Image: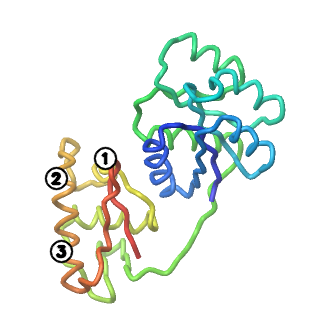
C-alpha cells in the first residue's frame, strides 16, 4: 500500500479523502500542523507523496514548500481553495508538482496521484484476500456464501465493482462510469435505490450484518 502524507486542517475533508483513496491501495496519514508534517517528512522516508493545503495555522503552505524542499524531494500536490493565479505560480515555482483547486472530486485527486506515482515508477502493491463473495465475471454471476444472487445486470456491475475494490470506498459516480448497464445520465439517487435492492437480496441469505455500508459524502464500501 502506498503511503501518502496530507497536511490539511479541514478534518472532514481529510477523512473523505482518506476513505476514498484507501480503495486504491493508498494510505493517507493527515496532520493539521504544518510543522508536524515537516517533521514527519524528515523522519519517515516511506511517504511517497504529499497533499498540501495552503491556508494553514502556524505557517502558510507556500512558505512551507521551501522548507520541505531543503531536505526532501517528495512529490507535492497543492490542494487549496485559493484559486489566485499568483498562488498557483508561486506554488509550482517553489517546488510543488501539481495544483488542484478546491472543491474537487476525489476521483480527480486519485488520477493526479496515480500520474505522478507512475512517472516515478511507484505502484501500489497488489493485495489478495479470501471473500465470502465469489465473482464469476465470464458468467456474470456472483455467489454469496455459496448461494447465487439473483441480480440484474446493473446490480451485477455495482456489486462486482465493490468486490473488486476489496473493501475500498467506491464513489457513486464510479458506479455510473464503470457500468455498461447504467445510463450515463442516471441520478445518484438511482444508485442508492439499486444498492438498497442488492442489500435486500444479500439479507435474504444472511441478515446478521450489513455488508454494504454508506460512506458519507462519497459512496459505498463492502464490509467482509
Tell me residue 47's x, y (percent): 70, 48
Percent coordinates x, y for residue 101 in the rendering: 47, 26
Return the disc, 1 or 3, that comes first in the chain's sequence: 1
Compared to residue 135, the image places residue 175 above or below, namely: above
For the N terminus, the image quarter is bottom right
Q: In the structure shown, which secondary structural element does the residue marked by tag 2 occupy? A: helix
The residue lying at 73 percent from left, 45 percent from top is: 40
Q: Nearer the viewer, residue 8 or 168?
A: 8
Q: Sort mark 2 into few (<14), some (14-19) or many (20+) by Cα contacts within 10 Å.
A: few
Lateral position of residue 31 relative to residue 132, left or right? right
Q: Which residue is mark 2?
A: 190
Report x, y in % for residue 143: 31, 82
Sequence-wise first label, 3 or 2: 2
Per the rendering, the mark at residue 100 is none
Q: For marks 3 and 2, give the CA distance.
A: 16 Å
Q: Residue furthest right?
A: 71
Residue drawn at x 69%, y 17% as measured from the top left: 93
Residue named by callout 3: 200
Check if mark 1's residue and mark 3's residue have beta carbons within 8 Å.
no
State the separation of the CA atoms marked 2 and 1.
11 Å
Side of 159 relative to 44 (left or right): left
The residue that label 1 is drawn on is: 173
Q: Nearer the viewer, mark 1 or mark 3?
A: 3
| Lower sequence index among marks 2 and 1 | 1
Decide if residue 77 is on the left or right side of residue 179: right
> Is residue 172 shown left or right of residue 30?
left
Amino acid at each position: 500500500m502506498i503511503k501518502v502524507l496530507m497536511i490539511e486542517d479541514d478534518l472532514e475533508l481529510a477523512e473523505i479523502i482518506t476513505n476514498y483513496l484507501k480503495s486504491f491501495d493508498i494510505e493517507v496519514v493527515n496532520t493539521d500542523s504544518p510543522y508536524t508534517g515537516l517533521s514527519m517528512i524528515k523522519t519517515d522516508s516511506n511517504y511517497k507523496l504529499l497533499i498540501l493545503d495552503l491556508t494553514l495555522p502556524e505557517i502558510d503552505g507556500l512558505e512551507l514548500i521551501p522548507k520541505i524542499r531543503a531536505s526532501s524531494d517528495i512529490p507535492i500536490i497543492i490542494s487549496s481553495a485559493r484559486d489566485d493565479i499568483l498562488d498557483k505560480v508561486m506554488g509550482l515555482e517553489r517546488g510543488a508538482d501539481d495544483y488542484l483547486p478546491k472543491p474537487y472530486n476525489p476521483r480527480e485527486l486519485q488520477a493526479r496521484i496515480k500520474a505522478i506515482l507512475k512517472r516515478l515508477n511507484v505502484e501500489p502493491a497488489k493485495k489478495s484476500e479470501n471473500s465470502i463473495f465469489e465473482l464469476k465475471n465470464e458468467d456474470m454471476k456472483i455467489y454469496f456464501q455459496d448461494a447465487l444472487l439473483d441480480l440484474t445486470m446493473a446490480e451485477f456491475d455495482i456489486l462486482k465493482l465493490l468486490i473488486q475494490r476489496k473493501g475500498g470506498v467506491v464513489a457513486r459516480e464510479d458506479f455510473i462510469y464503470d457500468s455498461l448497464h447504467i445510463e450515463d445520465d442516471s441520478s445518484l439517487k438511482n444508485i442508492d435505490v439499486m444498492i438498497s435492492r442488492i442489500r435486500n437480496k444479500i439479507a435474504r441469505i444472511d441478515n446478521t450484518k450489513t455488508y454494504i455500508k454508506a460512506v458519507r459524502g462519497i459512496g459505498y464500501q463492502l464490509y467482509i
